[in-house]
Amino acid sequence: MHVAVGVLCALSAPVLAGCGSAGTGGLESAGPTRPAVGPVRLWPDLPPATNPPIDYGESDIQRVPGIRVTGDDVRSVDAVEVVRAEVRARPDARNGADGLYEETARAVGACVSEPASCPVMRPYYRDLTGDGRDELIVGIRMPEQQVAVRVYRAEKGGLTRIMSTVDQVISVELAGRDLIMRVGSAGIPGYEYRTAWSWDERQGSMLPTRDEIVRAGRPGGRPPGARPSGTGPSGTAPSGAEPAGAEPSPAPPSTPSPAPPPTLPPPSEESP
């Protein structure tokens, strides 16, 4: 067998260059394999909780009163009117899924008469539930750099809110059927929280399925906010749906550097 292999290498030298050379094309050991370590249960005698808490996100499911959706198409509704309907139904809500600052609730109520001050931002659309129909994604600006993010699903001719959260948002992104929020960390400088919200069929709402703490994009500070990626709205956004953002400051005019002083030739020495 060794002779046959040697003859094959000799006859195939132009094609199998280095067939018998050590370190080129041969099998090499990757070193010893680390032994597999299985999970170890701590405190195995600890009894399980007898009264588990309610499912996270249960209170986020809410039918929006007074909103009819033509053909179960969320693009047929006005995002501003959706938020106004929720504020009218619960005008004093300051906490929980419906909670808004008092000044934010007043500004939402005045979106029609004062569109420039309307805190409801431009809506986005994406199929987050996998049923082939888009959901409505709404953001509401609030004081202290906080943003309320809400997601609505059209069903049976009405609108159901399937997600509601408030935080100091760095950015909101869409990746596939996940809505990813990046939030600054006040207690760990240089880090941020990144949470992926995903549709849960059993719960019937969007739940935070992945939560992690990662280093921020820029050392020593927060990365600049980014606009959500993904499918944007079709057609024109409702009037006043997004307050005008601050324009970037113009770069200061370049000041020409002063010209260096002329170099004088050395004085000529006169002959005595």
Image (cartoon, helix red, strand yellow):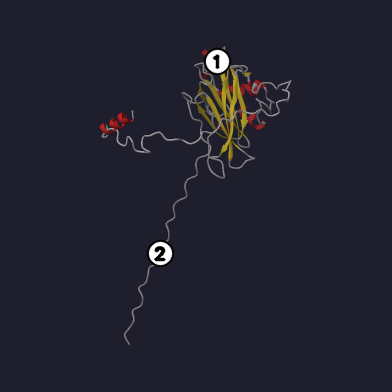
Q: Amino acid at mark 2?
A: Pro
**What is the number of the mark on residue 149?**
none
Vertically, is 65 above or below 102?
above
**Quadrant of the image occupied by residue 186:** top right
Residue sitting at the far bottom: 272
**Quadrant of the image occupied by residue 51:** top right
First in sequence: mark 1 vs mark 2? 1
Of the pair 85 and 196, the residue shown nearer to us: 196
Residue at 53% from the left image edge and 37% from the top image edge: 225
Q: Position of residue 39 (x, y in %)?
A: 62, 28
For disc 1, the neighbor class at 10 Å (few under 14, some 14 to 19, many from 20) is some
Q: Position of residue 251 (x, y in %)?
A: 47, 47
Vertically, is 116 above or below 136?
below
**Quadrant of the image occupied by residue 102:** top right
* 12 relative to 202 in the view: left or right: left
Q: Amino acid at mark 1?
A: Val
Q: Position of residue 217 (x, y in %)?
A: 53, 40
Identify the image quadrant of the C terminus.
Answer: bottom left
Vertically, is 83 above or below 245?
above
Residue sitting at the far top: 156
The residue pinned by badge 1 equals 69
The local secondary structure at tag 2 comes to: loop
Residue at 65% from the left image edge and 32% from the top image edge: 103
Q: Position of residue 49 (x, y in %)?
A: 72, 22
The residue pinned by badge 2 equals 260
For disc 2, the neighbor class at 10 Å (few under 14, some 14 to 19, many from 20) is few
Of the pair 189 and 88, the residue shown nearer to us: 189
Of the pair 87 and 55, the residue shown nearer to us: 55
